[in-house]
Each structure stands twice: as C-alpha cells, then as structure tokens.
Image: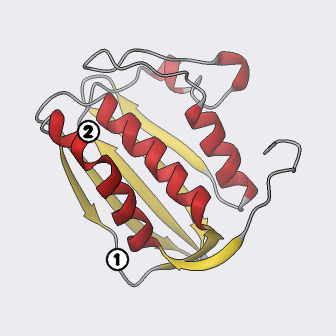
Amino acid sequence: MLQTNKMEIKIEKFNLYECLSQTIALLKQTALNKEIKISCFVDNKIYVNADRNMVCTIARNIISNAIKFTNKGGEITISSNPVENLVEISIKDTGVGIEKKNLDKLFVIDETFTTKGTANEEGTGLGLLLCKEMIEKQGGKLWAESEPGKGSNFVFTIPT
C-alpha cells in the first residue's frame, strides 16, 4: 500500500519527545528482560510535521531491533539534533554491530537480510525497508552506521 500511494499519510504537528517516550514505554519490559538500559536525550520542545503513527512505528521498529541485537546489560541511547528544517533522530546501541557488506543490504528489497538476535529472536528483515519507505514518503532519510562488536547507530530525519 505504501509503495502504490494507497496508504494515507496524515501530516500533523506533534511533540517528538512524547512519541518517543510512549514508544520506549511500550518496549521497556522487553529491554528490562535483557537488562538493557534505554536513555532518551531528545529535547521535549521539539515539534515535527509528520505522520505521528508512522514516526512512532519507525521508532518502535528501530528500538526493537536495537534491543534484539544488544547483549544483556547493554545500552540504547536516543538523541536528536536539529538540522535546518529537519530533526535528526539517532538510535544508537552497544550491540553486536553489522558488517559493512551486510549494512548495504539493510535497505534494499532484493537483498533481504536477517539474522537472529542475541537471545535468538527472529525477524523478517522487512521492517527497515518499510521504515525507509515511510520516512522517505514524508521527506526524510534513513541510514545506518555500524561496526561489528561496537554496536549500530540508526539515524533518520523528519521535517520540523
């Protein structure tokens, strides 16, 4: 539906911190089960112009992945940085990381890439593709930086 423009995008002004706080609250127990600390350093005065449900879904997917690929006792840090008429949201973990050759496959439909999480959690490998589509439909971008053994940083932009 997203690719054929049949999914309605409802742009509205909303508080980014509230969206992220609700998302973290939903995932808190999963993180606690693995003794993973989630810290959010997003300014509570940042408002974005985007589809609230999509942004919350994107954050939920990326944070869920961070939990999945972070070992027991690890940490996830969420931060924001205003850049011109956008806000950059960073979700950084201390997880297992991703090899460069696989990093390039994360956002390509023909290269669906999936691995088991640190507690053998499974996934389809499609979540990040959908996140990328949703972000781009709203005028933003999504990318990842990672190094094996040192964790990953997923960054996306949203219009303010």
Look at the picture and state if 122 lies above or below 29.
above
Quarter placement of the N terminus: top right
Compared across the picture, whether 87 is left or right of 149 comes to: right
Q: Name the residue under label 1.
A: 43
Where is residue 53? Give x, y as percent.
Answer: 59, 60
In the image: residue 14, left or right of residue 11 = left
- Of residues 25 and 71, the one nearer the viewer is 25
Q: Residue at x 55, y 17 (%)?
A: 113
**Reading the chain from its start, which is encountered first: label 1 or label 2?**
2
Quarter of the figure with residue 79: bottom left
Q: Secondary structure under badge 2?
A: helix
Horizontally, is 35 left or right of 60 in the view? left
Q: Mark 2 points at which residue?
A: 30
Left or right of 43, for residue 11: right
Secondary element at image label 1: loop
The single residue placed furthest to the bottom in the displayed view is 45
Q: Which residue is painted at 63% across and 53% down in the image?
A: 141
Amino acid, disc 1:
Asp
Residue drawn at the location 68% of the way across and 50% of the way down: 134
The quadrant the C terminus occupies is bottom right
- Tell me the amino acid under the disc marked 2: Thr
Q: In this view, does 53 lie above or below 3?
A: below
122 in relation to 64, above or below: above
The structure's colour scheme is: secondary structure
Estimate the x, y position of residue 60 in percent, counting from the top left.
44, 48
- Choose mark 1 or mark 2, whichever is in front: 2
Q: Between residues 20 and 153, which one lies in front from this camera angle? A: 20
Horizontal and vertical percent for residue 70? 25, 31
The image shows residue 85, relative to residue 71, as above or below, that is below
